[in-house]
Amino acid sequence: MFGRLTLSQVPYDNLIVGSAFIFAATLGLLIVGALTYYRAWGWLYRDWLTTIDHKRIGIMYGLVGTVMLFRGFVDAIMMRTQQVLAAGPLSHGYLGAEHGYLPPYHYDQIYGSHGTIMLIFAATPILAGFMNYLVPLQIGARDMAFPYLNALAFWMTAVGAGLTMISLFVGDFSQAGWVGLAPLTELPYSPDVGVDYWSWALQIGSVGTTIGAVNIIATIIKMRAPGMTWMRLSLFTWTSLTTNVIGLTAFPVLGVAIGLLSLDRYLGTHFYTTGVGGNFMLYTDLFWIWGHPEVYFIILPSWGMMSEIIPTFSQKKLFGYPVMVAATLSIGCISWTVWLHHFFTMGAGPIVNSFYSIATMLVAIPTGVKVFDWALTMVRGRLTFTTPMLWAVSAIFMQIIGGWTGMMLAIPAINYMTHNSVFVIAHFHCVVMVTVFAAVGGATFWFPKMFGFTLDERSGQWVFWLLVAGSFFVFTAMFMLGLTGMPRRLAYVPYATWWPLLVIEEFGVFIDIAALLAFIWQITVSIRDRNLNRAARDPWGTARSLEWLTHSPVPAYNFAVIPQVNARDEWAWRREHHLEHIMPEQYEAIELPLNTPVPMLIGLCTAAFGFAMVWRIWWLAIAALVGIFAIVIIRSFGGGTGTTITADEVRRMEELAMRAPRRQAEGQLVPGSVPVFNTGAVK
């Protein structure tokens, strides 16, 4: 009845997993207790779980990504600690391990979950959250083009992350690495459910990312405010567009690659089985055809955030805007031509290797353009090194390090020597840290827009300096270990001579832990002092793009009247022309879609389906599919799907928002009859 699921699949006798379960259960009980004590269950269901407001969905994306980021960071701590304790043949064993404290099978699971979580279920949801929240605001739209699908995309992503988390407590996770090394993912080599957890989490999550990509592309193309021409889009919107074109075209490839693997595991086909008609290199090609565009899927929005932060705190417009747009689009195109550099050593031959080497080096041209444009934006600017600016500038330096080492690895001769070493891991982590730095800077920058109060600046600077210092120690040691020949994926380090550098890595990890604690303190202090730090529309005073025209936090309707866009940096243009306090003379009713539990219910059925497929509980899988179809059909017979905010209500809400925290002029005439609102497009 329960397929392969038995009580023996619950690792209750594992001290590490048991401790993690106690921590998760305690935290869950505290959350449930708090919701019950404050009678917030109705609020949670009504305003969050059933929402289709792009802003709330964006925040929920960010919360899911942050939770998974914490989990992935714990995995990293465990791996680094294991290598320190397991260095050299004389190293001791603990908790039943021969060396260190993790047996190889457990270490391999942590290795696989770390990469999967950090890239797919941490970085991707966090960036999707920024895009969901900001893109409609930056183009002057009420919401996404398809609000219902937007909520459905979020729940698919959350289900994928949930399956990954469940694998920690019920069964195992994949031991074949986050990339799914073939043929280790085939059933004879991985007969347990670890690969199934990994494959279904990725397949379901990729469905959510694909749906989200369609939505954001349609929103940018069709929902722009009057006057918002292509060359007036903010750089973050341009990078979001390019990112989601990559997502729309790349994630289906991942779905096909893992779908064929599922056929191998469930139906006995042999797409990736050498010797019976299959070829495991087919999987490698398909995976990296997705995998390398995915790298740019992650980093392009980060560059967009840096392109918003740096001009704001340089008090200048972005240098070379048209070139930056061209560079963004060209990177999106070139990203499809470089995947083979991930396996230069497979013996493809000099012609193939030369092509992919040159293609990889070509990426450096538009990337270098961005670095120079950011630098030239700061030249002769009135720089203010607030926390967001510190994060953005440090991301530039991390980008330079990642770019330089990437160009080294683009040379096949160097790649042959460093291919399977931790030098590659250090390079890739430097690139990913660009995303981390930019995302933390972006979160600090737009936090007052999202929540109505600013983050504590002093503790934010502590977070910055600690994380930068920790990254320096970790990645410097990792580069040096790679150059001395240390392979990646080692649960046991055979040479004691590497131990000093491993200790330096561990020291850096402890500094990163201090940065995490400082971040928690920053959030705590900021919430405690929120009434003292209430934010106006533009709390920085020098912001530039259209989202700063809205209130902080942004109301459900985004804009009381759809703005008329007159310039590329519309908010800066209005501030320069003293138009930032202009209020519309009249309001009209606004139609908004109703919240609905349908996306959440489909997500719950999808979670049941994924769990059932992992454990081969066929009746549950069939019931879950029937439930999904039934919910969709019932929804198609639904009545009204919208609600109307009357013009009087809009006026009242706007007047109330304008009185706090700062009194702003109302009803002023626009000098020179410059249009600042489009009263013909208010719905």
Image (cartoon, rainbow, N blue to C red):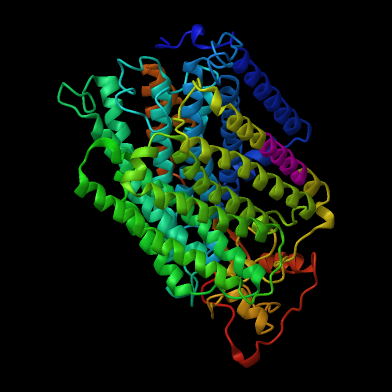
Establish if 430 lies above or below 84.
below
553 inside magenta stretch: no
Which quadrant holds residue 95?
top right
Establish if 65 lies above or below 53.
above
Q: x and y percent of residue 549 in the render?
A: 64, 70
Q: x and y percent of residue 408 in the render?
A: 40, 49
From the viewer's perspective, tell me whether residue 2 is left or right of residue 512.
left
Image label count:
0
Q: Nearer the viewer, residue 532 or 185?
A: 185
From the viewer's perspective, tell me whether residue 213 is left or right of residue 56.
left
From the viewer's perspective, tell me whether residue 237 is left or right of residue 520.
left
Prevailing secondary structure of the magenta residues: helix
User: Which quadrant: the N terminus?
Assistant: top left
Q: Residue at x 50, y 7 (%)?
A: 8
Q: x and y percent of residue 167 in the render?
A: 50, 22
What residue range appears in magenta? Answer: 510-523
Let me know if residue 588 appears in the view: no
Let me know if residue 200 appears in the view: yes
Q: Residue at x 61, y 80 (%)?
A: 573
Q: Nearer the viewer, residue 31 or 642?
A: 31
